[in-house]
């Protein structure tokens, strides 16, 4: 299952708060496609299947629920989702030790 850094969890909570969607979870998935074979997909989801893996990240009132389907979970073991907001890099980024190569955009891997 993927892990969220405190910074990523806080940013996800900010996005959920701005949408007024506290009941939703962040779904992280891996789909076939992209320039390297697989691509990451992230979206807010209220439809949680019984076989989804679930985890909670953050602290106290800033917690967020993350869900991953079983097939994606296998490809995300040991992966970390971080959020950066700086001059040279901004946005969410996944570091995945299972990726043997990634594309230049960082959104797909194989």
Image: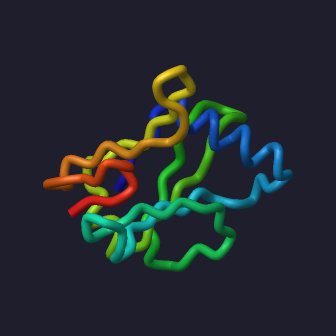
In this picture, residue 22 sits left or right of residue 89? right
Residue 18 sits above or below residue 39 on the image: above
Residue at 50% of width from left, 79% of height from top? 50
Residue at 57% of width from left, 38% of height from top? 9
Residue 45 x, y percent position in the rendering: 65, 67
Instruction: Identify the residue at the far right of this view.
Output: 20
The image quarter containing residue 1 is: bottom left
In this picture, residue 107 sits left or right of residue 85? left
Total marks in image: 0
In this picture, residue 45 sits left or right of residue 41? right
Residue 48 x, y percent position in the rendering: 59, 73
Q: For the C terminus, give its image quadrant.
A: bottom left
Residue 2 x, y percent position in the rendering: 37, 51
Instruction: Identify the residue at the far left of this view.
Output: 100
Instruction: Identify the residue at the far top of this view.
Output: 87
Task: Please name whichever residue, 105 or 12, is drawn nearer the observer in this view of the structure.
Answer: 105
Residue at 64% of width from left, 76% of height from top? 47
Task: Please name whichever residue, 52 or 103, is drawn nearer the observer in this view of the structure.
Answer: 103
Residue 76 x, y percent position in the rendering: 30, 58
Task: Please name whichever residue, 93 or 81, is drawn nearer the observer in this view of the structure.
Answer: 93
The image quarter containing residue 100 is: bottom left
Give the color scheme: rainbow, by chain, secondary structure or one colour. rainbow
Task: Please name whichever residue, 85 or 60, is drawn nearer the observer in this view of the structure.
Answer: 85
Residue at 62% of width from left, 33% of height from top? 10
């Amino acid at each position: 299952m993927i892990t969220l850094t405190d910074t990523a969890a806080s940013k996800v909570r900010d996005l959920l708060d701005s949408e007024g969607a506290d009941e939703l979870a962040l779904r992280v998935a891996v789909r076939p496609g992209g320039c390297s074979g697989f691509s990451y997909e992230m979206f807010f989801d209220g439809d949680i299947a019984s076989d989804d893996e679930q985890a909670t990240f953050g602290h106290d009132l800033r917690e967020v629920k993350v869900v991953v389907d079983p097939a994606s979970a296998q490809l995300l073991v040991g992966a970390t989702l971080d959020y950066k907001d700086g001059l040279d890099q901004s946005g969410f980024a996944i570091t995945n030790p299972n990726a043997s190569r990634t594309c230049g955009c960082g959104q797909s891997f194989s």
